[in-house]
Image (cartoon, rainbow, N blue to C red):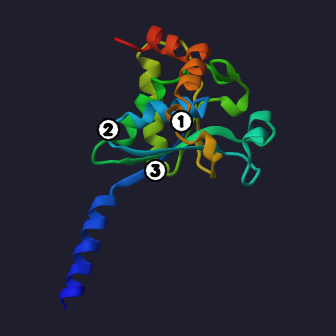
Amino acid sequence: MKKFNIFLLVLLFSTMAYGKIQEAVLAGGCFWCVESDLEKLPGVKDVISGYSGGTVKNPAYKEVSSGTTGHRESVLVKYDDDEINYATLLYYFLRGIDPTDGKGQFNDRGFQYSPAIFYMNENEKNIGEKVLEKIKKDGKFSKIEVALVPFKNFYHAEDYHQDYYKKETFKYKYFRFRSGRDRFIKDHWNNK
C-alpha cells in the first residue's frame, strides 16, 4: 500500500508540474534568432528549431533553405500557460521580427524564411487574429504580412542548429548583427 501511495503522489506531482505545458509553432526567419529570443521569456520551458508547413517528410536544412520543400524555418515553443499565455507569447514573438516583410526576414530571403503563426485550434487562430490586428492598429506599421496558417507538421532541425546561439556564441552574434535584425528591433520596437 505504501508503494502505491508513493506512486500516486509521484503521478499527481508530475501531472501538476507538466499539466499546463502548451506548444506553439512560429516562423520568424532564422530559427537561431527566434529560438534565442523566446528562450529568454519567463514561462518558456524549451524552444526547438525545426521546419514546418511543407510537404517533404523529415527535410534537411539544405532542402529547406533551397526553398523547394514548402517548409518554413520555424520553432516549436513549449511554454507554461500559467506563466505566459499564448497572446503574450505571440506579442513577444512579433517584437523580434519584421512583421511587414512577408518575403523573408532581414538578410534571409524566400518563402522558407517568411513569418508565420501556425495555429493548432480555433482558439489559437482567434488569438492570432486579435494580436495581429492589435499590432496593425498600434500604427507602427502600414501593413502586417505575418501568415496565420493551420498547423500541419513540425520536424526537428539537425542537432547543430539546436541552441546554436549558445554553442557558437561569437558566430551567432556576428550573424545576428549583420542580418539587421537587432537594428530593426531597436528602431521599431524598443521603448515604443
The residue indicated by pointer 1 is 167
Cβ atoms at labels 1 and 3 below 8 Å apart:
no
Q: Earlier in the sequence, mark 3 or mark 2?
A: 3
Q: Amino acid at mark 1?
A: Lys
> Could you tell me if the residues under marks 2 and 1 are in contact, i.e. CB atoms within 8 Å?
no
Q: CA distance from mark 2 to mark 1?
A: 22 Å
Q: In the current view of this chain or complex, which residue is farthest to the bottom?
A: 1
Q: Name the secondary structure under disc 3.
A: strand
Image disc number at residue 15: none
Cα gap from disc 3 to disc 2, whole angstroms: 15 Å
Q: Is residue 100 visible?
A: no
The image shows residue 164 at horizontal and vertical percentages of: 56, 35
Q: Is residue 71 left or right of residue 92?
A: right
Q: Which mark is residue 42?
A: 2
Q: Secondary structure at mark 1?
A: helix
Kind of residue sitting beneath label 3: Glu
